[in-house]
Image: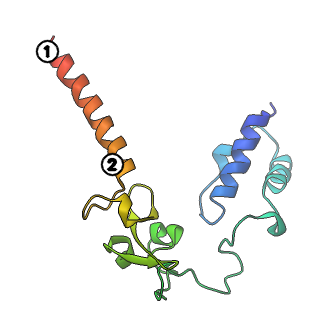
Amino acid sequence: METSKAEEKRSFKYKMEDEDEDEDDDEYTNNELGSGEEERRKRMMTPSPSTKKGSGSGGGSTPPTCQAEDCNVDLTDAKHYHRRHKVCDFHAKAPVVSVAGIQQRFCQQCSRFHQLTEFDESKRSCRRRLAGHNERRRKSSSEFHREGSH
């Protein structure tokens, strides 16, 4: 059975997003194909080095470092989360970090740096994400109370 175009696009998108991760992509290939056909299809779906987007971690000439200014922490041996988001543990938790000359804070929900004005007081999640989180909590809490009152 052949894979649909949507499945192939999902597979390609998945490989592009996670090209630096060592994960098993077998669930995104069609297991009914012969091993030769399967390998050929995998090669077709994997982009060549010239078509890869972003700097990636290929080549290995420069180790991944924290994006905070004047922070030269080598993230090679850091947790996967810190390597993926290019932030060291210290700056991920710091209340103020200078990134690209702007005072910012790392948002735990978005996994990105935002300007300080997007945070309430010393919170580590931006207002927008906290509002969505609180709304979901209120919704599930009200559903729980409604079920209990029957």
Left or right of 119? Residue 24 is right
Question: Any mark on residue 149, and which?
Answer: 1
Q: Which label sits in the foreground, 2 or 1? A: 2
Image vertical order of residue 32 relative to residue 62, above or below:
above
Quadrant of res 52:
bottom right
Left or right of 13? Residue 79 is left
**Mark 2: amino acid:** Leu
**Mark 1: amino acid:** Ser
**In the image, what residue occupies the spot 82% across and 57% down?**
43
Residue designated by label 2: 130
Image vertical order of residue 148 relative to residue 40, above or below:
above
Quadrant of res 132:
top left
Q: Where's residue 119, x and y in %?
A: 33, 59
Q: List the single residue furthest toward the top.
A: 150
Q: Where's residue 46, x and y in %?
A: 78, 57
**In the image, what residue occupies the spot 25% across and 33% down?**
138
Task: Out of 132 and 32, give the one closest to the viewer.
Answer: 132
**In the image, what residue occupies the spot 32% across and 71% down?**
93
User: Dot 2: within a 10 Å radius of its alpha carbon, few (fewer than 14), some, or many (20 or more) residues?
Assistant: some
Image vertical order of residue 54 relative to residue 74, above or below:
above
Q: Gap in Å between the C-alphas at discs 2 and 1?
A: 29 Å
Task: Please name the colour scheme applied to the rendered image.
Answer: rainbow
- Image quadrant holding the C terminus, namely top left
Left or right of 98? Residue 42 is right
Q: Where's residue 110, x and y in %?
A: 44, 56
At mark 1, the secondary structure is loop
At mark 2, the secondary structure is helix
- Image quadrant holding the N terminus, namely top right
Quadrant of res 116:
bottom left
User: Dot 1: within a 10 Å radius of its alpha carbon, few (fewer than 14), some, or many (20 or more) residues?
Assistant: few
